[in-house]
Amino acid sequence: MKRVLTGLFLIIALTGCQSSQKSDFVTVADGIFQVSGEPYYYIGANYWYGVILGSRGEYGDRERLLRELDHMKSIGIDNLRVLVGAEGPDNEPFRVTPALLLSPGEYNEDLLEGLDFLLAEMKKRGQYAILYLNNAWDWSGGFSQYLNWNGYGLIPYPNVPPNTWPQFMSFSGQFHSCEPCISMFEDHIRFILGRTNSYTGMKYTEDPVIMTWEIGNEPRAFSEANIPAFEAMITRIAALLQELDKNHLVTTGTEGRHGCEQSMGLFERIHADPNIDYLTMHIWPKNWGWLDIKNIAGTVGSGIEKTNEYMNDHLEVAERLKKPIVLEEFGLPRDQHGFSTEESTRSRDAYYSNAFAQILDHAGRRGPLAGCNIWAYSGEGRGAEGRIHWQPGDDYLGDPPQEEQGLNSVFDTDTTIDMISGFNRGLANPMK
């Protein structure tokens, strides 16, 4: 095209382009999510392994990624919660392989390109990404890896005897008081947010495909003594994210009361921070003792009752703060607590249906329960025969390496898929 625009017309044209681009971002207004001035409610999925599939390295599988993105889009899933990348050396026990941040300042270039590719393909499909930047748990490095890098010793992996979960949690909780750990995390944030997508040429900070920067996956204080340092860390990282990126939302990634030392006051305080745009909660009936795994069908009803009580407690906080809230992790095993696609998911479908119906209800009346992300979409992946834990070369599933492969997976052949599709169709016309 010939360069015939005057300087004035060029400024007007560019201003219009930027305005149009800005309208595509997910924003918060009047206590709900909005896109282009319209309410945005969603039933989405956790898809932590998406970046790895998008990479060109030995662990990548772009053909599978594209098929799964197409499949999710076909059933109305337009919101994916994704791990930016694991930290630490590869092949640690029960940990995500390959890692993105191999050592401080050293990145796996294949995975950086994989993140670019994933975001570019999601953009083509009109999908949004919630990107979490750290992890309180061991399965992707996270807090414990930063501690290891800063001289706190070997990571006491809880699935490796004689280590225990209390021992690991005590170790991980030291992160909040480790100044060099937090500074190192801030360097990682600056690096990721400073990136330009190699496929779209768009800066991450200017790309509407990213909905949210999430401080971490289930960040916890891990003891009452750590609460002040934990709050200070959340405040500090949220402020940095908002300083670096004026376009995207910021949230915590917390489970809610269960991840806040059972304190609703702590939950409310960290989400009252003006740099936190919305609230999060996670719900795990099996892990929290709300479900008898020997009688899932007989106890799922009481699990639903406790789930609704938990949700209502957190919705009250969201209403007081006038911010949206997202149920961004929740899952249930198959009916007999098996891992095969051949086993039914009637109880899980009932459990999911209860949550989805509440999203649909809030969408119809513009309530604060703005969305959910099931844990987790496993698509066409399948667990390896003859063992239950992931090993290099196996398909990636929604169940991280420390969990039984298939434990909470939603596979592409499950009856759950049709249910998700039906509820998402309902979200398309929530007022009817």
Image (cartoon, helix red, strand yellow):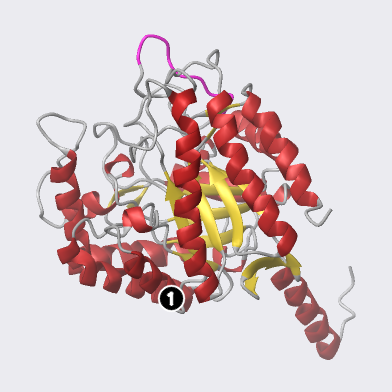
User: Which residue appears at 31% of the width and 60% of the height?
Assistant: 260
Tell me the amino acid under the disc marked 1.
Answer: Ala
| Residue annotated with mark 1 | 272
Note whether 157 is above or below 128 in the view shown.
above
Specify whether residue 317 is painted magenta.
no
User: Which residue appears at 50% of the width and 29% of the height?
Assistant: 409
5 sits to left or right of 377: right
Note whether 242 is above or below 71 in the view shown.
below
Total marks shown come to 1
Q: Is residue 52 visible?
A: no
Give x and y (percent) for residue 207. 62, 63
CA neighbours of label 1 inside 10 A, class few (<14), some (14 to 19), many (20+): some
192 sits to left or right of 50: left
Please tell me whether mark 1 sits on a helix, a strand or a loop.
helix
Give x and y (percent) for residue 314. 46, 61
Q: Is residue 325 visible?
A: yes
Q: Which residues are magenta?
A: 378-387
Give x and y (percent) for residue 52. 48, 38
